[in-house]
Amino acid sequence: MLKNVNKGKGPVLTGFLLSRRKKPLGKNPSNKGKNMKSIIAAVSGVAIVGLLWVFFKPPFGKNIVHLNTNQRVVALTYDDGPSPPYTDPLLDVLAKHEVKATFFMIGNRVEQHPETVRRVIAEGHQIGNHSYSHPLLGLLPPSQVRREIERTDVVLRQIGVKGEIVFRAPVLTRFLPVAWVLAKRDRAHVSCNVWSWDWVTQNPDRITKTVLKKVKPGSIIVLHDGKGVYGNAKRLGTVEATDRIITALKREGYTFVRVSDVRQ
Ligand SMILES: [Zn+2]
């Protein structure tokens, strides 16, 4: 090939190649500028992804997603209550099956419905902290995060909650400010590994199927007896699904515990 190319065009091509060689890539000011820009863009990209990762998935503090056991034991957890029209029938279902659960309550609703909270305590369930007003906690500054958590702790103590107060962030937003505030107090965040999706559907069949498909020993199942911002959402589908889920899991040999019953 080279022989053919050189035929008649040899001097021209050689001259061209030599002229290219005189300007190596790195020494061309415009190429050098482009290379620098590419390096800066790549480093910035990596840094931004790293910062986002640290913000949304802080690599410190304790995030509990399942119970520390291989036994056929699960924890039913209910967020966003108390909401008497749903919390009360739910308590009836749990009592019928003699099952204890964990309720992550919103502080201002605890103040609004103290009688329901007292019933939850009297019937032996665990009550956790789910912030005072259910904001997207992970997107707030640490000072506000602290206020939301501490205010709810105070409300829960005042109404008679004893022992450990477990915490779960609204919409599971355990982002950097939340993880940081919790880590400073050596406090864990209680997440879950089974989403019931009962905030999307209140069809008891669908909620039951979703939970039963994903459940395994040690699962922490998240359901709702209220709703974060709009407190009047209907939750009777969750109540009915709870009845079915407990019946089905008992048949498979599962037992039910409160989150703090299994040492993490
Ligand atoms: Zn919530």
Image: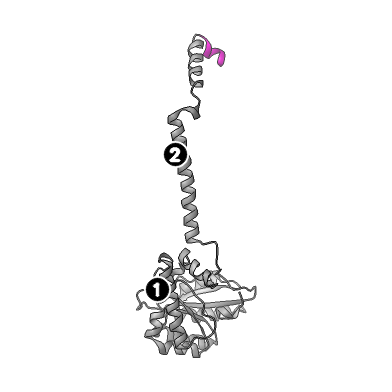
Residue at mark 2? 37
Q: What predominant SS class does the magenta segment belong to?
A: helix
| Residue type, numbered disc 1 | His
Q: Which residue occupies 50% across, 18% down?
A: 17
Disc 1, ligand 1: is the CB inside 8 Å?
A: yes
Tell me which label, 2 or 1, sits earlier in the chain: 2
Disc 2, ligand 1: is the CB inside 8 Å?
A: no
Residue range highlighted in magenta: 1-7
Q: Is residue 160 visible to the viewer in this orientation of the structure?
A: yes
Reply yes or no: does residue 194 show up in magenta.
Answer: no
- Callout count: 2
Considering the image in quadrants, where does the C terminus appear?
bottom right
Query: Colour mode?
Result: one colour
Give neighbour class at mark 1: few <14, some 14-19, many 20+ (Cα, 10 Å): some
Give neighbour class at mark 2: few <14, some 14-19, many 20+ (Cα, 10 Å): few
Please name whichever residue, 100 or 37, is drawn nearer the observer in this view of the structure.
37
Q: Left or right: 86 with respect to 18? A: left
Reply yes or no: does residue 6 show up in magenta.
Answer: yes
Q: Is residue 191 visible to the viewer in this orientation of the structure?
A: no
Residue 125 position, x and y percent, is 52, 85
Residue at mark 1? 134
Q: Secondary structure at mark 1?
A: loop
Q: Secondary structure at mark 2?
A: helix
Please name whichever residue, 229 or 41, is drawn nearer the observer in this view of the structure.
41
